[in-house]
Image (cartoon, helix red, strand yellow):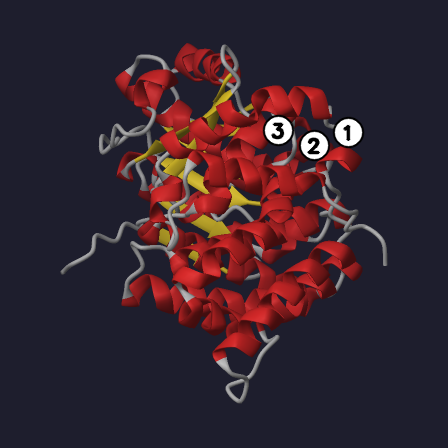
Amino acid sequence: MSIGVALPRIMEIGAGAINHLPSIVQSLGGSRPLIITDKMMVQLGYIQQIQTLLSEEGLEADVFDGTEPEPTAASIEAGLACMLDKKYDVIIALGGGSPIDSAKAIAILGKHGGNIRDYKFPRQVNEIGIPLIAIPTTAGTGSEVTRFTIITDEKNDEKMLCAGIGFMPLAAIVDVNLTLSLPPRTTADTGIDALTHAIEAYVSQKASPFSDSQALSAMRLIGPHLKRAYTNGNDIEAREAMMLGSTLAGVAFSTASVALVHGMSRPIGAFFHVPHGLSNAMLLPGVTAFSIPSAPERYADCARAIGVATTEDSREQANQKLLDALETFNRELKVPTLAEFGADKTRFDSLVETMAKQALASGSPSNNPRVPSIEQMIAIYQQLWGNSQCQP
């Protein structure tokens, strides 16, 4: 059976790739670019760098820096109003997953109208929006090469999954130099997000030989380099491996989809404002333990790709080493429990069934090798209140 693969039309990958931005804007027919970003990118000087780069080629770019860490329907409307004000003909998204996800939504709404709620899954958004160039500054979300965007509906605290090739950027610029300023916490959270993408794509019921090749390559890059990048942000070799691993993981899950971790992670972010990569990290060990019985060979492959098991290990030994490694990652990268993050247990208990239902409705859990019931998801959620993972 054939599979459908969607990728950006143009990709520039490697140190200094950002210098190709002006020619990419022009190749997409752009003459009035709008940069969509956040205030941190402005403070770090990246926006001025890009505006200067474009200006030297006769392209004057305006900036919308009002994106939010967890983009909402309201924040999308604000960005859309800015974009429609001057009828920009190309969008440049710079930042982590949130600015890129915001820009994807704005690109679709700017051309086709409506509200982002109109475009949530199970609708498949295959309409092409305003040309979008995605430039990630984190090694984690892979959003620059995916056909998904996640936007929070603040009216009911639901993280909406929006999917379809319409959300795929036309161009992606993956430049490791833009990640060197990432602080350790963000490096860890986005790095585990990328690792989760690769693992879930590989064990997904929608996996294929194409997505397998990307997912395994991503795990081989991320496994040995995640802690190195977290410990020493100037380790350029580790940063490059994480950046490429993140993009490959994005390609993998854009084709094979994510699974139970992501399905359960989104409600945690919506209700308790836990950063997406961090909530993935909280869930990954428990969900993996739950899922291994239905895909033991696949998870053993993950353990070997990450580098925590060898071909001499039995399937059972490899799977145990994978579970141990995921716990070790969380401990060494100081991933908190929900309680340590500051979530209220009483509120959690009152919402946990709603969270499980939202997770199931997103569609992602149905891709898992072991598809859970609502009761099983509630049990996995309850594990998040276990012992601290932050102690050395």
Amino acid type, residue under disc 1 in the picture: Gly
Q: Position of residue 124 (x, y in %)?
A: 25, 32
Give the residue displayed 59% in from the left and 31% down from the top: 268
Residue 169: tell me if it is visible. no
Q: Position of residue 378 (x, y in %)?
A: 53, 35
Give the residue displayed 27% in from the left and 39% down from the top: 165
* Image vertical order of residue 65 relative to residue 251, above or below: above
- In space, the residues marked 3 and 1 are separated at their CA atoms by 18 Å
Q: Label 3: which residue? A: 69
- In space, the residues marked 2 and 3 are separated at their CA atoms by 11 Å
Q: Position of residue 247 (x, y in %)?
A: 47, 56
Specify the quadrant of the image occupied by residue 168: top left
Farthest residue toward the front? Answer: 375
Farthest residue toward the bottom? Answer: 312
Q: Quadrant of the C terminus?
A: bottom right
Q: Report if the CB atoms under discs 1 and 2 are less than 8 Å apart.
A: no
Q: Camera-side residue: 240 or 185?
A: 185
- Classify 10 Å Cα crowding around label 1: few (below 14), some (14-19), many (20 and above): few
Q: Label 1: which residue? A: 342
Q: Report if the CB atoms under discs 2 and 3 are less than 8 Å apart.
A: no
Q: Position of residue 20 (x, y in %)?
A: 47, 51
Which label sits in the foreground, 2 or 3?
3
Which label sits in the foreground, 3 or 1?
1
Amino acid type, residue under disc 3 in the picture: Pro
Q: Camera-side residue: 338 or 376?
A: 376
* Image vertical order of residue 245 relative to residue 379, above or below: below
Q: Secondary structure at mark 3?
A: loop
- Classify 10 Å Cα crowding around label 2: few (below 14), some (14-19), many (20 and above): few
Going from the N terminus, do you reach mark 1 or mark 2 first? 2
Q: Camera-side residue: 266 or 381?
A: 381
Q: Label 2: which residue? A: 40
